[in-house]
Each structure stands twice: as structure tokens, then as C-alpha cells.
Image (cartoon, helix red, strand yellow):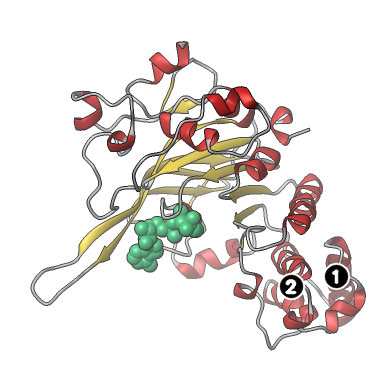
Amino acid sequence: MSQASSGSADDRKPVLQAERVSKYFPVDRTLFRGPRLLRAVDAATLFVRPGETLGLVGESGCGKSTLGRVLLRLTEPTYGRILFEGTDITSLPQRQLRPLRRKMQLIFQDPYASLNPRMTIGDAVAEGLIVHRLAATRSELRDRVASVLDRVGLGPDSAERFPHELSAGQRQRAAIARSLAVEPCFVVCDEPVSSLDVSIQAQIVNLLLDIQETTRAAYLFISHDLRVVRHVAHRIAVMYLGRIVEVGPTDRVFAQPLHPYTRALLSAMPTADTSRRKLRLLLEGDPPDPLAPPTGCPFHPRCAMADADACRSRTPALEELERQSHHRVACWHAADTGSA
Ligand SMILES: Nc1ncnc2c1ncn2[C@@H]1O[C@H](COP(=O)(O)OP(=O)(O)OP(=O)(O)O)[C@@H](O)[C@H]1O
Ligand SMILES: [Mg+2]
């Protein structure tokens, strides 16, 4: 069973909230003119609750990793507000952010990004526990490291190993152990299984889910693979050219996608269901240049439903079509789709 069915609307307070968060990168500065602005993330609004997974999907370059990093304040937002456990952390100085760092972690696609090749796995896991003073004595530290390694399915002798001595799957387990040893309550998982063999992917995904069950950590789970996202996410957000264009409970979004872009993404998914194949919509053309985004709805140049008025001139806001559905979409024609 997918997670989606267990996590519907509820009143748990979000661990993390983002309100119209934007990240613009200045690029292409030359001697003769100032930089142009690349809108990697544009007015993204989202929240994640304890124990919940929000899946984040969209084509390469649409701004998923940037959004993840901005939420963790590893990249500074250009505009917008980020609240962590109710506290506005948008402009909190790094010194005050430090105690919160433990609670917000990032798991990368490439485990080498978080594992120092010259440090043993045991030391890598111990490092966070030491920095955040989570073990009072040396023996407590050793015990905690052993217990975390055991939790992620690595034997006690892996503590003495170096990252290159492990298999790719074991290395990702070690990176997860390092992130989760410090007991975070919000974890950005940025394509955590994309570089692994398919046979190993399920093991790592299930490990992350098992851990969530006991820790109640909230995950922002970034992935290209919609099948993985469907399995792990309670809710799913779809990004296009820096903007969130649809968000809602996973089951709903898969059953009744409201944005034409979401429909195209879903219909490109490999499936045994032939009725779906008949409806296959193809995404035509390349994603537009983020340095010269289209006016109006960012998707309009690739959209079969686009009209000359609203779609080309005004950007639609992310809105609920049906009250209390928790399913939001940014499309001028969503009402036509929703009732179709
Ligand atoms: N430090 C940077 N300076 C300038 N532009 C950047 C920087 N980081 C990212 N970008 C640009 O911002 C946009 C979003 O990039 P990002 O890496 O967030 O996309 P993504 O959705 O994670 O892509 P992928 O699926 O390939 O990982 C891209 O156009 C990228 O080139
Ligand atoms: Mg990325």
C-alpha cells in the first residue's frame, strides 16, 4: 500500500512552512552589462507536517534542489519567508541557526557529498553527535554510533571502513546514518536513490520509510521517478520552471491531475495500464529558457489548452479548485479539466 492513503488532511502543525519563497541567481554578468536574473525558484509556497512526506517532482532544472537548499537555508532566499517549527528563520543569523541545523538535514543523491573519503564511517556518524553534544561519554558515543549503523542495516564492522570500501547501497546507508544520527525533524532527500541499482532502490526507500515511522521526521522527497514518489509521498508538489504548479494528496494527484503539465508527466510514466497509454500526452518542445521565462503561465508555450488571453498574459495563482480538497493548481483552465 502506498503511504498516500494514510496521510490526509489533519491539524498537525507543520514542521516547515515556506511562503512565496524565491531564489534568483544573478548570471551572465559581462564587462558591459550587469547580471541577468535566473529565477530558479519563484514564489513557492508549501508546508510539511511531522511524519509526513511531501514529494517534489518536475523536469531537470525546474528548481527542485534549489528549493530544497533554500528551505534549509543552505542557499539564501531572495524573497519570501521560511518558518521552521513556527519560528521565522528567513533572516536568522547563521550563529542562531546553528542549534537548528541538527534538526534539518539533507540526504544527497551522491553519498560522497556528505561522506569524507578519508574518514571512517564510524567517525562520520560520530561527528554530528559530537558537534551537537549528543553523547556525554566516549562509550555512549560508541554505543550510539553502533546503534545507528545497526538501524540502517550496516554491521558493526562497517564503523572501521572507509566509504570506498562499501558498495553503493551501503554507502547511501552510511550517509543516511550520518544524517539521521542527530535525530532531525525535517529532512530534504534530494534524489536519494537515483544513482542506485533498481534492486537496491527499494531497500533504501523502505529504510527511509521505516525510520520515518519511528522518528516522525518530515521529508521533502525530491525525485524524477514518479513511481518512487507515489510509493513514499503522502502529498506531492509538481514544479515547473521554478513554480509549484500543482500540489495535493498523492492519490488525488495521480487519480485526477489538474495541471496539463502534471498530466503530461504522469502519462509519460511507464505503465502496464493500456487505457492510460491511449491517453498518453507528450510533452512537446524543450523546457523554456529560465533566463527568458514566458509571460503569463510559464507552461503556456507547451500547453494544448493555452489561450491567447489569460494564459499568455497573466500568471495563474496556486488555488484550491474544490474547497477542503487540499488539492491546489495554478492553471486558468483547471476548472474545465476538473469537471471533465
Ligand atoms: N548556483 C547557481 N548559480 C546559477 N544558476 C543556478 C545555480 N544553481 C542552480 N542554478 C540554476 O537554477 C535552475 C534550477 O536548478 P536546480 O538544480 O534547482 O534544478 P533541479 O530541478 O534540481 O534539476 P535536476 O533534476 O537536474 O537536479 C537551473 O536553471 C540551474 O541551472
Ligand atoms: Mg536537483
Image position of 307 (left or right of 186)? left
Number of marks in the rendered image: 2
Residue 253's x, y, as percent? 56, 28
Residue at horizontal 8%, vertical 73%? 32
Mark 2 or mark 1: name the one nearer the start of the chain. Answer: 2
Q: Which mark is residue 220?
A: none
Q: What residue type is labelled 2?
A: Leu
Residue 332's x, y, as percent? 32, 23
Residue at horizontal 53%, vertical 40%? 47
Residue 230's x, y, as percent? 65, 38
Residue at horizontal 84%, vertical 76%? 141
Q: Does residue 112 lie above or below 267 as drawn? A: below
Q: How far apart are marks 2 and 1 (CA)?
A: 9 Å
Q: Does residue 114 lie above or below 54 as drawn? A: below
User: Which residue is situated farthest in the left direction here?
Assistant: 32
- Classify mark 2: helix, strand or loop: helix
Q: Which of 305 and 79 is in front in this view?
A: 305
Residue 329's x, y, as percent? 43, 28
Viewer can see residue 244:
yes
Are there few (<14), some (14-19), or many (20+) residues within 10 Å of tag 1? some
Viewer can see residue 20:
no
Q: Which mark is residue 129?
A: 2
Q: Nearer the viewer, residue 191 or 151?
A: 191
Image position of 338 (left or right of 305)? right
Q: Residue 144 carries which label?
A: 1
